[in-house]
Amino acid sequence: MKLKPQWICILIVGLSFGTAWAIRGQFGHEQGAAWAGAIGGLALVLVSERSDWHRNMLMITLSSAVGWGFAGIISYGAIAGKYAQSDNFTNVYYGLMMLFVIGALYGLVGGGLVGLSLDSTEKNRVKWGQLIAEMVAGGVLVHALLVDQLEILMTPPRSEAWAISLGAGMAMLWYMARNNHSSPIRVALFAALGGGFGFAFGEFFHLVMNWIELPFNTWNMAEYSIGFFGGIGMAYGVFSSKWEHETEEPQKWENKVALFFLIGLIPLIIFRESFSYGMFLEKYKELSNGTTIAFLNSLSAGCVMVLITGTIWYFLHQSQEPFGFRQTLLLFLIYTIGYIVLSYISTGLFLGTFLKNSNHHLYLINLLVAVLLLRKDYKAFSNKQTDCIDWKTWLFWTVFIILILVLFALIAIRLHGPTDDSFDRFPV
């Protein structure tokens, strides 16, 4: 069966975002998710063939980075590493469902902010200051109500920041509904479904591959899953929705601020958290040449980040605004290739073990496939674009996924032996 052109474009976004999210697993937290989110946003703009979106690529990319990075505050180590790997249905199903919720929160805010950046036109401009204030207030209030007052806890005694993401997402949806941003709501909801299913399915896939005893970093494939399905959900929401054309060009200060965050602040935070000399020194303290390896890792990562920043700034500075497809492609390639190189450095480039990291080589294959598909002129948008929200269809797929997770849980408890009480959120 031949894929329709629209689905090839959606696949490009899924491949790009999945690859970036798998790399994100090496760095974690908000900054890693932000870099991955930026790559997903760039892939979306690339395949859109919308000149107004190319002109505004930096602001769209920043929105994707901030939106997908926001839920990085959520703690899910116990859910993925303990509850979902328990030996009884109750706790495994709880673990998979909570991964669905967390993945949905990633997609909700990430897809929502991308949708709003696409929908912020002269006809209906988004009031970003008001939106941010409402999301902050929503996050604080929902956390205070659910966690502090009602004591609804997901992973005690760990952080319950999921409630902050939930409150921010609810406030964002309320802002969209009040201000007639219907298409961004569609994007947020479909991205939530994709991200939620991707995270839960990725954990199930991880358990199955461990049962098969495949000599491969299967958890990295689980991380790939949330990006792949989250990217597909976001892209489907965008390319099946109606969007007004933006007639105004972004102001230069807006592009400069967005560029500062993308090639300045995000790389700087990742370097501090993942590539500092002291961190590597502690990691390799047992090796006889640990000091040398730590120095080489930190120095090479710093050089790569400086090269990424300098190259992007130079080419965009030399380009005459407004930006077009060429500039968007350039930013996408440099940002993605740079992220892959940093992942190689982080996982043993100077230890001589990087050739054994076969999952890293798949990053390059994914990128190559995406670039080859980009050479074709595919139509991204559906012939039946709408700004109507089909709640019945969305609820159907939500219930369908919840039921599928029942099957996953029933299979998962048979994929390993008995576990101790530390794997249980609830006594059984």
Image (spheres, rainbow, N blue to C red):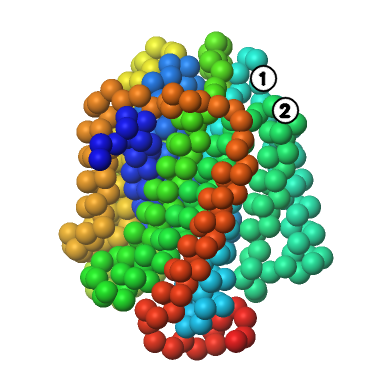
Q: Amino acid at mark 1?
A: Asn
Residue drawn at x 42%, y 42% is 232
In the depicted structure, whether residue 296 falls above or below residue 15 = below
Q: Nearer the viewer, residue 200 or 157?
A: 200
Task: Using residue 193 as the reference point, say whether residue 54 is left or right of it.
Answer: left
Task: Using residue 75 as the reference point, say whether residue 290 is left or right of it.
Answer: left
Instruction: Name the quadrant of the N terminus.
Output: top left
Residue drawn at x 43%, y 13% is 321
User: Mark 1 — residue?
Assistant: 124
**Image location of residue 155, percent across then percent down:** 61, 71
Q: Which mark is residue 179?
A: 2
Helix, strand or loop under label 1: loop
Between the residue at mark 1 and the residue at mark 2, the CA separation in whole angstroms equals: 8 Å
Residue drawn at x 43%, y 65% is 203
Q: Nearer the viewer, residue 296 or 169?
A: 169
**Image location of residue 141, percent across then percent down:** 78, 52
- Crowding around mark 2 (Cα neighbors within 10 Å: few <14, some 14 to 19, many 20+) is few
In the depicted structure, whether residue 333 falls above or below residue 401 = above
Helix, strand or loop under label 2: loop
